[in-house]
Every structure is written in structure tokens, then in C-alpha cells.
Amino acid sequence: MFTVEPKYHPALSESILFFILTIGLISYFLIGLGTEPHIPILIALLLIVMYGLIRKIPFKYLEAGMIAGAKSGMAAIFLFLLIGILISSWMISGTIPVLINTGFTLIGGTWFYAIVFAVTAIIGVSLGSSLTTTATVGVAFIGMGSAMDASLAITAGAIVSGAFFGDKMSPLSDTTNLASTIVQVDLFAHIKHMSLTTLPAFVISFILFAILSPNEAITIESLETYRSSLGATGLIHWTSWIPLIFLVFATAFRVPAFISLAASSVIATLLARMTSGLMWSDIWGIWFNGYTAETGFEPVDSLLTKGGINSMLFTISLVILALGFGGLLFVTGIIPTLLSSFQQKLQKVRAIIASTAATALGVNVLIGEQYLSVMLTGETFKGVYQQSGLSNKVLARTLEDAGTVINPLVPWSVCGVFIADVLGVSVLTYLPFAFFCLLSPVITVIFGGRTLKG
């Protein structure tokens, strides 16, 4: 929780009213006007400053609240910069291309929807981006489904489910790093504890997709262009597995996330220098601007063109603004008043977790932004969890189970609009079949406050 003390204690009705007004403002700009989230958050931040001044809170305290809020996200910011480098280095070392290629080799058999779900999940974990996964291999699978006369609604549901499994469980994911940092849980401990609810959701989803799959076998030839283009990059070598294997061992031995990701990036960079023929000056440029693929096959080029410090600056600036906004909500007493009300009414573990899930879901519906769903809910409920003796790991897990994976199910959300556009399937059409996304918040409430050892 922020280290600043509230300098004003508004009535509960006043806190609720102002909170709804600011959320409504952000919703209007994001949904009604289609602006980037930075703009309404900055405007809301200025409005809270005005509110604080009207309530006679000296500006120095308001400024301290903003700084304290932004400071609480510095660990995430450094990690985001490092992830940009990691993605770039894993691209040029062939680690991400070899993972994608391996996913494509699994295509075959008659369980079309189940295999689409599993392969999209593998690629989603390797990329750490649900939208990139959906816009590339997801589009390919939609084309295959159309050619087979399979249900596009179920195919899209399988793609979305797999992509957001990857977004949730990948150490490269923005939201996964954000959730772990907001509630001060080690990244890999967070991923491990998410498995308690994520794996059951994955297994149940896989079974449902297998049951619904058509009997017609998948033709592997339709993916041969993808595989040949991946091979044409010249990035795939046996050494491409080394950075991933190192990261797995580092995780097993509980090496801090920053150190393990940094070491894996350095190893991948050294391997790339030996195998790709890139000069050091080229590598440093890729570290900053990301890797640009030029295979001549646009879908694969889109799949591999990513990474770099520059690619993370959008997210970093959003995190700073949103956390500064959160800091003001604390110093003006708005969040502390709401927290006090929660702490008085929420005593049972399941009620606390259900309220957390409902809040994360509600922010997604009202604002349509998964980052804010994670950040605002995390900051709001940290005090409640501490007061109730619940582990922060449970909070981090709930934020992802009911925050990250719900965004693609909201038709006016950032993810919902994007996915419907690239797949050509409306959100309400694929929503009933996005089994993984639908199951995650239900399972997180059922499991309650359980945690894994370690």
C-alpha cells in the first residue's frame, strides 16, 4: 500500500460518488471517444488534484501522493524495460521462433478446436502477448476453420482462450508482471500460484473443445507456409533452446525474476552474436527498437517483429500515470474510506475474493482496460487482504483470474474491439465459447484463499 497517509477523510457517500465520477470519465473517453487511456487518466488525475485543493489539502501532500504512487511501480517499470530486451534477444537467438515452430508441429489429428486452443496457448506463453498471438496465428486458425466449415464462433473462442492463457502464464506478459509488482509478489511465485486455478481451467477447457471438435482431420499443409517462413529466418538452431532452459532452471532455483530474465537476455544475445551474424551495433539497435522480420510472408513478419525497450514505453507511461492517479486517491482519503467500509463488511475469505473478482470484472466492464482493472483493484484490496491475513499471492492470482482474462469478453474493451476486428468474429459470438476466460473467475472464487507451498 502507498506509504502516504490520507490528509482528508471524506464521507463514504462522497468517496463513492467521486470514484464513480472519475471511473465514468475514464469510461467515456475510452469507450465513447476511443482515446488512448493516458488522456482520461491524466484528466482524472488533474480533477483529483482540484478536489484535494478544494478540500484544503496542501499541494505538497498531493504531490507526495502522486510520487508515492508512481514509486510503488518502479520495480515493474525496470522489469518492463528488461522484458523489452528479453523479447528482442529471444527473437534473434531463435528462442521464440523455435517455440512457435514447435507449436505448429503439434497440429494434426481430429481435435481441431482443442489443438487450436493448446497451440495458441503455447505460442501465447512464448510471446507473452494475447493480442499479437490472436492477430497472427489466430488469423491463420480462423482461415483453417473457415476452409473446414468448422464453427468460427468456437474456433475464435479457442483462440481467445489460448491467447489469454499465454498472456496470464508467460513471464514476458505485461499484465503478469504488473499484477505481481502491484501486490509485491515475486514474478515466478505469482506464476506458480496461478497454476492452482489456471491448470484446472485449462484442462476443463481442453476437454470441452475436444468434445466439440469436428471429426474431420486437420490438413498440415495449410501451415507449411508458416513453418517454411520461420525456417527461412535463419534464426532457429539447436542453441535456441538454451535461453529458455536456463530460465526454467533459474525459476526452479528461485532466482529473482529480474536477475533470471537479465541473465537469460545476455545468454540469448551472446548466442545470437555467434549464430545470426549480426554485428554488435545491430544487436544494440534491436535491444532498443526490437527485431524486424523480413521473410516476405507478412503473417510471420508480424509474428516476429516485436520487442525492444521502445515497445514498452507506452505501457510504462500508462503505469506511471495510473499509479500516480492511485496515489491521489489515497492521499485525498477516497480509497481509504472505501477500504474501511470493505474491512468492516468483508470478513469471510470467500466474500473478500468474490468482491475482488467482482471489482476487477466491474472495472473491465466500466472502463474496458485490463491494466487499470489490475492496478485499481490491486491497490484497493491490498489493505483488505493484509487486514484479513490473506496472502498477497491470492490477491495477485485473483487480479489475473478476474481481470486480465475478462477484458476480451467485453465488446467495448481494448482487447474485445481489437480481437473482433482481426478475427472477423464479434465478441458476443465467441463469448460463450471462450471457456478458459469464463472459467477462470469462477474457479478462483471456488478455490478461495488456498495457496501452494513455497
Image (tube, rainbow, N blue to C red):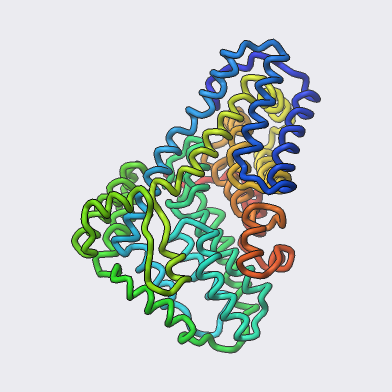
Residue shown at the point (56%, 54%) measured from the top left: 197
Q: Where residue 44 sits in the image (x, y, percent)?
A: 67, 31
State the residue in front, 106 or 84.
84
Q: Position of residue 370 (x, y in %)?
A: 61, 47
139 over 390 or under it: above or below? below
Residue 161 as seen in the image, left or right of residue 101: right
Would you say 238 lies left or right of 31 here?
A: left
Residue at x-position 48% and y-position 27%: 71
Q: Position of residue 90 (x, y in %)?
A: 33, 58
Of residue 189 and residue 423, the one placed in the foreground of this image is 423
- Front residue of 236/106: it is 236
In depth, the one of 266 and 118 nearer the eye is 266
Q: Quadrant of the C terminus?
A: top left
Name the image quarter holding residue 66.
Answer: top right
Q: How many marks?
A: 0
Identify the residue at the far left of this view.
Answer: 274
Residue at image coords 58%, 26%: 327
Residue at 39% across, 77% down = 227
